[in-house]
Image (cartoon, grey):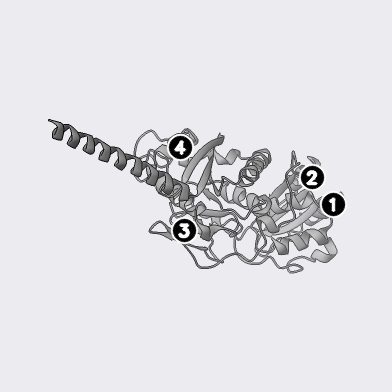
Amino acid sequence: MLYQKTTQSMIALFALLVAVTGAAQAETRAAKLANVTILATGGTIAGTGATSTTTVGYTAATVGVQNLIKAVPELAKVANVTGEQVFQIASENMSNEHWLTLAKRVNALLAQNNVDGIVITHGTDTLEETAYFLDLVVKSRKPVVLVGAMRPSTALSADGPINLYNSVMLAASPEAVGKGVLVAMNDQIQSARDVSKVNTSTPDSFRTSELGLLGYIQGGKPFFYRQSLRKHTTETEFDIGTLQSLPQVDIVYGYANMNPVALDAFVAAGAKGIIHAGVGDGSLASKVVPSLKAARAKGAVIVRASRVGQGILARNGEANDDELDFVAADTLNPQKARILLMLALTKTNSTKEIQRMFYTY
């Protein structure tokens, strides 16, 4: 009887030691993992459809951040993850005010020693714009990764879970430090400055068509092959810490038989800057030139961009920018040129200085 009791006691002690050791090992593994905060803003990645085959016509921004995290339990293997619901909107409703709130929260979190990286879930319609805005105003070398989905969470082929897993892994990786704000979708790593949404609905909608992606995600690891040489994050001159609003900048789209009605309306409404998304190399229709000159005379800064989507916008090419006192957008598409001009106008009204910024960022 004494032998049996002794044996039982030894088994119980052994089980306790195993449990304590296992818990200690789990704590050690958790301590070695990076701390990643997911900031959720809504979008398709948090969307739901009427059926499992609904991939268009769904409702965006219905799933909360905690449920997004619970849906991907594998996240616990790559990082210590926490989540915050910053907004819950479809990204076509993203505003300047949303950007300022989000950027300030990102900077506050990254200033903490217990935060190693940030993932931002976002609707795809304006994801590239939010990414570029953050690329210009985040003041940390720690990784910031934007992620979305082209199909809602309820779809049979939902891409949100693997995109979220990859983005958290990327934000937790040392390889992503100092690379600027990144976009992680479809097993690819893209730079915030250069990536665009180029398809309405397919999972491979985010591409950097001409300059190329930064790398791939495979087997739970990031593989970088290049990086952008344009300045970003800690290297920029922009500080939104005390800003409550951004200057009004609007986009005028070029097309055959164009007229100046929209341009004149934007200027009358108080636009401080106009992005002219011209045809070809940013060509200006003769009907619109007088209104562009008048807008510049009133103090609005005019940036010539192109609706084409690729290539360098040649300064003094299709228009005499020196004579007109206009700015050339370089390789930025119209929507990203708008973001840079808004931030530039918080610093200066000098077109020479603003042109320098377009060649720097």
The label nearer to you, 3 versus 2, is 3
Q: Which mark is residue 280?
A: none
The residue at the point 40 percent across, 48 percent down is 77
- Amino acid, disc 4: Gly
- Amino acid, disc 2: Val
Q: Which mark is residue 47?
A: 4
Q: Which residue is mark 2?
A: 267
User: Earlier along the polypeptide chain: callout 4 or callout 1?
Assistant: 4
Q: Nearer the viewer, residue 192 or 336?
A: 192
Q: Quadrant of residue 356?
A: bottom right
Residue 209: x, y in percent?
Answer: 53, 63
- Disc 3, SS: strand
Distance between mark 3 and mark 1 Cα atoms: 45 Å
Q: Could you tell me if residue 150 is visible in this image?
A: no
Residue 100: x, y in percent?
Answer: 68, 41
Q: Residues within 10 Å of mark 4 (few under 14, many from 20)?
A: many
Q: Residues within 10 Å of mark 2 (few under 14, many from 20)?
A: many
User: Earlier along the polypeptide chain: callout 2 or callout 1?
Assistant: 2
- Amino acid, disc 3: Gln
Distance between mark 2 and mark 1 Cα atoms: 9 Å
